[in-house]
Image (tube, grey):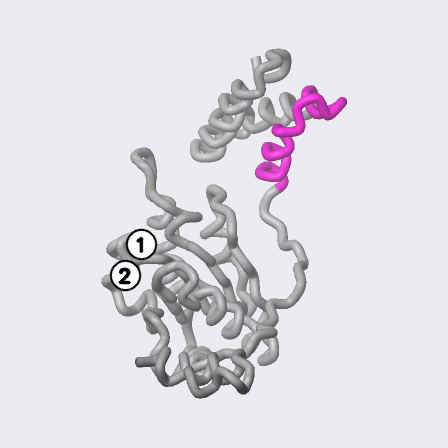
Amino acid sequence: LACYCPDNRVLGYAVDTLMYCYRTSDSKGMLMCARIHSAVNRNEEYPHLNGLYNIMTGFFLKVRPDLVVKEPVYGVHPEKAEKVLRSFKVFQRNLGVILSGDKGIGKSLFARLLSAKAVEAGYPVIIVDQAFPGIASYIESIEQEVVFLFDEFDKTFGSNHDSDPQSTFLSLFDGTSQGKKLFIITCNSLHGLNDYMVNRPGRFHYHFRFGYPTGEEIRQYLTDKLDGQYQNEIEKVIR
């Protein structure tokens, strides 16, 4: 059906079949999906099936540009980033950090800042921005000291009526898995995270809640951005 029907919506059946075969360790079923992919993709008539190939070849790392922070960082964020890295250096197990707050309030900026400092300290940074079955086991298999960044974790691994992808990470975040890893998670609200993930201190050592900037942070920002003729208006804005 997936091979010959011109309606691409039926390709969902092939993907569902592959996921079922993966969960049940049905090697023959996965081989069937491989044959479907081979037959369909020979002439690139159904490029959507490339997703099957990516899943079946296993996980792999892709090099991307280093995370850099080009704009000035205000407040105590640099000090917080240094504190996290100092803790990670002395910890003998995994260390987790949750960054929560409204959109556009500074979570991703802090995550980039922390990641950039980690790279400077010699730690590789791996960004996980897609949810695939088995990804938690793959991460656990990495024994090197490494930093993992999950931006918008609550959306990428959001639960639905059929499953809760976040539950597969509980043992990984416990700190008892092999290797030593720093996990950085950003989310808009803690309500979007698994309760067992939030309510167990051993899984996440730090939780930084990002609220609206303080008066001093606003003062520093406006001092940098405004022309001299408007500097005397800064205090009025803060008030």
Relative image position of residue 76 (x, y in whole percent): 41, 83
Magenta stretch: residue 50 in it? yes
Q: Is residue 180 visible?
A: no
Quarter of the rendering occupied by the C terminus? bottom left
Query: Where is residue 219 shown, x and y percent of the image?
Result: 42, 84
Q: Secondary structure at mark 1?
A: loop
Give residue 61's quadrant in the image: bottom right
Specify whether residue 164 is painted magenta.
no
User: Are the residues tagged 2 and 1 within 8 Å (C-beta)?
Assistant: yes
Task: Please name the amino acid that badge 2 sits on.
Answer: Val
Range of magenta residues: 39-57
Q: Which residue is mark 1?
A: 193
Q: Residue at x 29, y 58 (%)?
A: 190
Q: Residue at x 44, y 48 (%)?
A: 156
Q: Position of residue 238 (x, y in %)?
A: 34, 80
With respect to residue 30, does 63 lie above or below? Answer: below
Q: Secondary structure at mark 2?
A: helix
Going by the numbered disc 1, the residue's amino acid type is Leu
Q: Callout 1: 10 Å neighbours few (<14), some, many (20+)?
A: some
Q: Position of residue 94 (x, y in %)?
A: 42, 69
* Residue 198, label in figure: 2
| Location of the N terminus (image quadrant) | top right
